[in-house]
Every structure is written in structure tokens, then in C-alpha cells.
Amino acid sequence: MATQAQIHEIGVFLGGSNYIGDVGLTTYIAPNEPAFGLLYKWNKSPRHSYRFSYTQSKITSNDLDSKEASRNQRGYRFENDLKEVSLGLEFNFFDFNLHESSTKITPYVASGLNYFLTKYTLTNAKADLTVQGRTERRKSIAIPMIVGIKSKITPSFVLALETGARYTLTDNIDGSFNQDFGNINNNDWYVFSGVTLTYTFGDKACYCAE
């Protein structure tokens, strides 16, 4: 016997962030700062949903942590107060009907378009001095590439583990563009990794069988 369907989800994201670019480590997934956010999904079918989120974190990286000798010698460090809003689509590998009472689990991928605000400070990590004129606020666009796995753990809650790399349309998250260092042909990336917990609610969707 089917129960009432839940086609909407609202919840939270908790995890960490890391940066990939011209300063510090070059590891793709290495969270070093806490990140948190809010998440809403509108499930349009068992295989896809519209997804809206707000996430924020402090993004940091330090040349002194790098294994590259040139970065170690340069000794720059930056931190960036980043706030992001995202709109996109999420696709499930398997059917994920929230109206069914049985436990469900599926891998998923998501993408879309992000708009983010940043306020970075670039410093000389060795001397602990702010680089001349390098505390600025910026805004730009990013393309998220998210992979994860989720499960309906109760009739009303869905738990997911995900990591999402954001390819930005700027090379200045770290302040490197205006200072003319690093590879000017490569844009910056940032990554959010963590868990989401969402509460499901709403009327029965048209794709649900009686």
C-alpha cells in the first residue's frame, strides 16, 4: 500500500571546502575549512529534480603547505569569504520514488549554474603582511559538477553524501590575476564536500501510481 508522496525536499548541507588554483596545495579533494548551507529540491520524476542551494565557507590556501618548491619559496597565503547561490538539475542513477515506504538508495549527479560573491585577502605567509592593495570584493559565475549517493533513511528524511567541484569563470579567487603570478590560462576551482539532510513533504506527484 502506497503512502502519500513527498515531492519537495528542504534541508541543510554540512561539510568542508577546499581550493584548487595558483596558491597552496593542488589536491582535488582536501577540505580544510568548514562549509554550511541550505538546500531545496523539487522532485519532478523518480530520476530527476530541480535543485536550489545557498552555501558559504571561508576558502583558504597556503604556499607553505605545498610540495612544489616554487610555491614554498614564494610563500603566499590567501583567505576568501565566499557565498554561493546555485540553481541546477539533479539526476538519479536509479528510480528514487519518495512515495514508496521502502528504503531507497541511489547514486546521483548534479550540475547547473552558480553565482558567487567573494572577499579575498592575499598575504605574504612568511612575513604575515598583506600584499599591497590585495583585499577586494568580487563576484563571478561557476559551473558545479556534483557527484553523490543518497538514501531515504526514514519516511520523511533523506541523507546524502556528496562532493562538488566548482569551475569558476575567474582566475582571481586568490588574488593572483592582478598580481600576475601563477598560470593565467587556468581558472580557479573550489570544492564543497559533505553531507545533506533533507525533510520531504508535498502532494502526490503525477508520476506516482496508485
Image (cartoon, grey):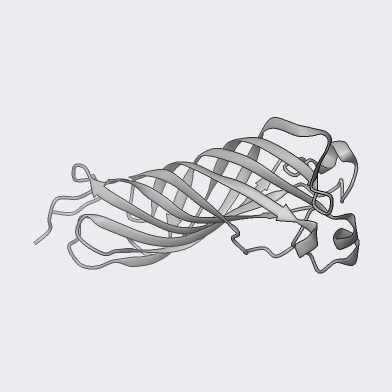
Residue 131 to residue 102: above or below: above
Residue nearest the observer in this picture, 200 or 69: 69
Residue nearest the observer in this picture, 43 or 208: 43
Query: Where is residue 99 drawn, in percent x and y?
Result: 20, 55
Query: Where is residue 17 drawn, in percent x and y?
Result: 58, 54
Q: Is residue 176 left or right of residue 98?
A: right
Query: Where is residue 175 drawn, in percent x and y?
Result: 79, 40
Residue 11 to residue 194: above or below: above
Residue nearest the observer in this picture, 107 or 200: 200
Whether residue 170 is visible here, answered yes or no, is no
Query: Where is residue 14 drawn, in percent x and y?
Result: 44, 54
Q: Quarter holding the C terminus?
A: bottom left
Q: Is residue 8 left or right of residue 113?
A: left
> Toward which corner of the image does residue 24 lie, by quadrant?
bottom right
Residue nearest the observer in this picture, 108 or 160: 160
Residue at figure coordinates x 8%, y 62% from the top left: 1
Circle count? 0
Residue at figure coordinates x 54%, y 43% from the top left: 112
Q: Is residue 30 left or right of residue 63?
A: left
Q: Is residue 208 left or right of residue 149?
A: left
Whether residue 21 is visible here, answered yes or no, is yes
> Toward which corner of the image does residue 168 lie, by quadrant?
top right
Residue at figure coordinates x 25%, y 49% from the top left: 200
Residue at figure coordinates x 90%, y 42% from the top left: 180
> Toward which corner of the image does residue 156 lie, by quadrant?
bottom left
Residue 160 to residue 178: above or below: below
